[in-house]
Image (tube, rainbow, N blue to C red):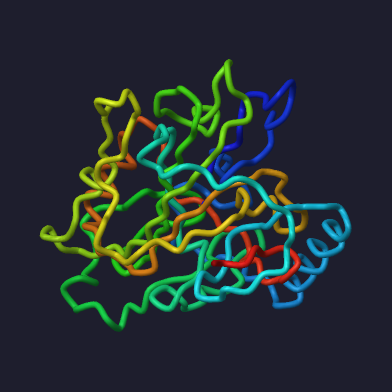
Amino acid sequence: MMKKILIALAATALMGAPAFASDHGHSEGHGHAKGNAHASHAVVADSVIAKQRKALAKSTKGKGFGPQSPRDIDALAGANKRLFNVAPAYTEMNLCNIHFHKNAEHKAKDFGIYAGNGNGEGYQSGYRYDTALLSKAELAPAKHKTCDSAHSTLMPGDTIEVHYVHTTAQVKPGPHLSSCLSEAIKNPQLRVETQVFVLVNDKHAASFKDLTKYGKAKSGLYQATGIPNNTGAPVQYAGSTTGPDYNEKGSPFQVSWSVRPHVAKVNIATVGKWCEKNNFNEDHGHGVRNLVNNPDLLSAIQ
């Protein structure tokens, strides 16, 4: 599910701390030149992921961490006993940020194919849609590089998970998750409306420009007007912020999640245009946190 929070929560909380996605800054290291997306990427062994999971369990055991994210939304069980108030419906909150991840952070039947271990730092991992369900035309190569970064270039058939981040603070949407806080409220309630998309080379597919539209409603709240309403009832659960920096430590933040279980198709060309210019300073797909499967770190889905 984001850029590093740049301002404090209380006096210093969130300063430099990753919120919804720990890789949400624009560091493009690891020896890959920008634009070299098709170069080979080292894929770590299963033992590396197992070690990260073990470290997460050890660092959180007995510390009182709340439920974590991301998770398999088809698995309802969870043993974490930490409770917090569920955030209001997103229509009663302010939209504060929109961004997306390359591959889905969450897992569900419709996006349940494991993309692999990746580089161990959140890239080339996560879950994806079954491209066998797409037509040859939908998978035809794009004319231009899309959301090109050191770690990947988006291509037809790729899966992305979009996070529409909402806050109870009185703010206006903007870059970074610092836009979700205000001088008046440093500890707002947070909700992430989540939609997984598959990119297709089809001008008749949904436009990402429309999907990311927002405006100020009569209520005075900033509202995302393009969130799909035909991809199933969102699975709601109590969780945390995400991102690869939390692969070995727990996130201390509390987030109400609404994850839609079905995938929608989006025109890849419109995603590329959005990456070129948007109000959130987003230009690439971000990495994912390992799926959390430790029952002690998961809430029960009601």
- List the single residue furthest toward the bottom: 132
Residue 89: x, y in percent? 41, 45
**Residue at the location (27% across, 55% down)?**
228
Q: Compared to 42, does 223 lie above or below?
A: above
Q: Is residue 148 visible?
A: yes
Q: Is residue 37 visible?
A: no
Indicate left or right for 229 with 240 as reference: left
**Residue at the location (38% across, 76% down)?**
110
Number of labelled discs? Answer: 0
Indicate left or right for 57 with 193 as reference: right
Front residue of 60 and 202: 60
Figure quadrant of residue 214? top left
Front residue of 116 and 13: 13
Front residue of 183 and 21: 183
Q: Quadrant of the C terminus?
A: bottom right
Q: Compared to 55, does 4 lie above or below?
A: above
Figure quadrant of residue 281? top left
Indicate left or right for 48 with 147 as reference: right
- List the single residue furthest toward the left: 204
Indicate left or right for 27 with 144 as reference: right
Residue 77: x, y in percent? 63, 74
Residue 53: x, y in percent? 76, 68
Residue 235: x, y in percent? 45, 63
**Residue at the location (21% across, 57% down)?**
267
- List the single residue furthest toward the top: 183
